[in-house]
Image (cartoon, helix red, strand yellow):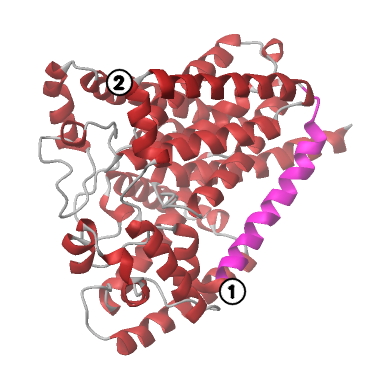
Amino acid sequence: MVNWLMPFAIFSKTYTFFFFDLFSQIAVVVFGLFILVELYLQPARLEDVLPKTTTLRIWGVFIVAQLILMTYQSFAVGATTRIYGLLHGLMMFIQVILSIWIAYTIQKMLIRSYADAIKFMKSVFITMAVYLGLIVLPQILYLFGLTSLSHWVNPIAHLFERHWANRDFYDSGSYVATSMRVNGFEPEAAYLALLVGIAFSPFLLMLIQEPLKAFKNRWIYWTALILGAASLGVLLLAKTTTGFLLIGILALVYWLAAPKKQKISLFFLGIVALLGVAFAYVAVPSIHSLLNTWIFQKGGTDNRLGGTIALIKTWLQHPLFGVGYGYEGQYIVDNLPEWSKNNFEYMQVYRKQAYPILNDLFGWLARYGLVFCLTFAWLLFSLIKRSLVILKEITGQFDERSMFYRISIKAFYMTVVVVVVVSAVTPSNVMSWPILLMLFFYWRVVHIAENDVFAKESEE
């Protein structure tokens, strides 16, 4: 049963803009119905999937505090198009909580053993291969001049591509045809980069870091290597600053996590790669233009920088508990530097609607405050602490279980680092079904590995 989770999660199209993004996608219907049917057939499982009492209390206090804040802000801010409003904001907030609970619950229901975890990762590999081969590759070929593929790219986009409201990114039939950038099913190129860089790449990179000779089935290693190379190509061809940022972060974390013997060779390989990029920048006009556009001479950053400054000011004005879910838009506009308003996107889009959060880290702080952000960080670090104990126990062991647990735990660390760094610069899209499923997959692996490793030790 666990095999079908990621294939549904990958379809990101939203069928209405009234609900929260995740609640407007096909995955919520499939996952939600499965949970309800399973609990109806086996009511005793409800107690099994509920979080621990301490976690429930933390969530309870968090929800109550947010409801109080939202009620207060509805009177303090008043009626404006820049906020969700109390009723709509309350509905959206409940949907956010339910989305997290659904991802948590379905992974706890279906990933109950080492065998289940293996099945899930196999399905992730297959989903990624099919997605890149049937959706992303035709888009890349279209960019390289095979315009006849528009008969495949545009109809597929019409059926499954996620769109932003009131944007002209899709006027020529798809985002690819309009913007000449690769996006998969995502609303824009940066979100495809986030999907590949956060949901898929960490596990692939940690897998290929294991010695080839340790794999009984070497096709697993070579498959991961091919998919990893394909991921690098997608991050490059997405033509987005986020993609280049992810390449840099993933490469650095991969090097830091590598065994000592690999670090030296990887260091020199990195030097060669940088020299190759420098040569291509000088000698290849298309590479020169690409790097200038998205790194060295990137323009259009006024909204992101101005929005980040406004979020920091908003958080400093409400440091402990934030302003409440959906009410940050008015405060962002109030705190925006004047120089950041003199651009087309602000004048034509953001001025007329709720100003989006363009920096997740400070967006979380502005919405939820330091108290709750630190509380959830404490829960995360508690899981990391437990996983470190397991990792210490299985270091140097090359049986299949130990290798899988080691790869998963190291991929978990890489995912956390990538999310934190990216969130400090730009939206990380962590509240998407594929990323949520992967985060709760790692959580389940830590629990399963904990039981396996220490049960084995007690038997010995």
User: Which residue appears at 57% of the width and 72% of the height?
Assistant: 370
Mark 1 residue type: Val
- Horizontally, residue 380 falls left or right of residue 156, namely right
User: Which residue appears at 12% of the width and 16% of the height?
Assistant: 148
Q: Quadrant of the C terminus?
A: top right
User: Which residue appears at 68% of the width and 24% of the height?
Assistant: 267
Residue sitting at the far front: 282
Helix, strand or loop status at disc 1: helix
Bin the neighbour count of mark 1 within 10 Å (Cα to Cα): few under 14, some 14-19, many 20 and up.
some
Residue assigned mark 1: 371
- Horizontally, residue 365 falls left or right of residue 35, namely right
Q: Nearer the viewer, residue 198 or 179?
A: 179
Q: Quadrant of residue 153?
A: top left
Mark 2 residue type: Leu
CA–CA distance between discs 1 and 2?
44 Å
Percent coordinates x, y for residue 40 in the rendering? 40, 53
The numbered mark at residue 137 is 2
Percent coordinates x, y for residue 170 in the rendering? 15, 41
Q: Quadrant of residue 135?
A: top left
- Horizontally, residue 119 falls left or right of residue 392, namely left
Residue sitting at the far right: 460
The residue segment tinted magenta is: 372-397
